[in-house]
Image (tube, rainbow, N blue to C red):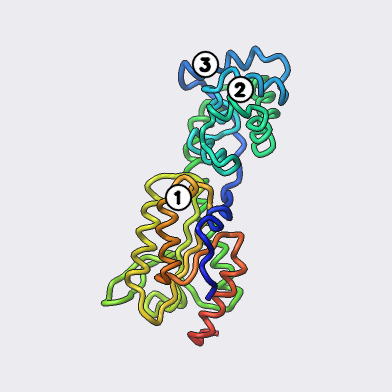
Amino acid sequence: MSDPVPFEDYLASLGRLTAHVDPTASTPEAENIREAVRSLDDVADIDVASMSEWAAAHPDWVSVLGLVVGLSQEKLKNALRDKFDTSGFVTLARTRPADLINMLDADFDLLRLLRVQQDRKYGFADVLIARAGSRVTAFGGQASGRKVEDEIAAIAEDLGLSWVARSRYTGRNNRTAPADLIIPTEQNALIVVAAKGFDSTGSKLTDAVREIEEMAEVRLPTQFVFAAIDGIGWKSRQADLRRIHTLWVNRQIDGMYTLASLDQFRADLEDAAHRLRLT
């Protein structure tokens, strides 16, 4: 098995999981947004210089730029924390407005989307599409978790291992625990893997930690427990992430991986399967 890496190194290896979804409509939701939009309409030429000046003059309205590119305030903060190691968009707008605008344009196509949406004429269908936006967000959250699951399942498949996805298995004292990948079966769980990918934050991250702790608690001496964890949402829940990392350091679980270290996951999974004579 691979040795635990320092927590800071693991934190630095977390990456974005969900693809950016281009918004098709933007509707005023509050008087603050209306005022911000009126101010944006007064900007003659939309470019990095003018938008940097606008952000510095109106730092509290940077969240509206997030809405322009389809980011909720939470996702905007997570994106900023990933890039600048801080989620404070007001401070960034005051102190580093050009860096802020350049990042939003490079990562989310801010300038083009702002020009396109300001000039576009909106109809009733666009209103309905905007109201369906929460469904897009919910799907994106599911997709981020599935991306990690799909990657680890593909590795297990490539190694010729039998596996079951998203089920429960039996461990010590006949206690059960959830796992996102069980090898080879629920009834004969020899290798279990948690796959927890989140680009947003919330109680689901705490639930994920609880599940992995439960896996560590019920593990049998003959069972291997791995955790594949990625997504920039964890950067806003570092205490939760550290709890999982501590399990790894204390050897209560056998490995912890991001998508960037799946080659190590493959090597460790293959090693565990060989020890268990599954291959």
Nearer-the-camera pick, 79 or 252: 252
In the image, residue 134 above or below residue 39: below
**Label 3 neighbour load within 10 Å: few <14, some 14-19, many 20+:** some
Which residue corresponds to the image point at 47% horizontal and 57% vertical from the top-left?
A: 196
Residue indicated by mark 1 = 238
In the image, residue 252 above or below residue 110: below
Q: Quadrant of residue 182?
A: bottom left
Residue indicated by mark 3 = 34
Where does the image place residue 273, in percent across and percent down from the top left?
Answer: 52, 81
- Marks 1 and 2, how far apart in space? 29 Å
Does the rendering let one see residue 141?
Answer: no
Which residue corresponds to the image point at 47% horizontal and 69% vertical from the top-left?
A: 226
Q: Earlier in the sequence, mark 2 or mark 3?
A: 3
Residue indicated by mark 2 = 55
Q: Residue furthest left?
A: 173
- Marks 3 and 1, how far apart in space? 35 Å
Q: Secondary structure at mark 1?
A: helix
Q: Residue furthest bottom?
A: 277
- Marks 2 and 3, how far apart in space? 16 Å
Does the rendering let one see residue 184?
Answer: yes
Query: Does the residue at mark 2 contact the one at mark 3 (Cβ under 8 Å)?
Result: no
Which residue corresponds to the image point at 52% horizontal and 22% vertical from the top-left?
A: 60
Query: Does the residue at mark 1 contact the one at mark 2 (Cβ under 8 Å)?
Result: no
What amino acid type is highlighted by mark number 3? Arg
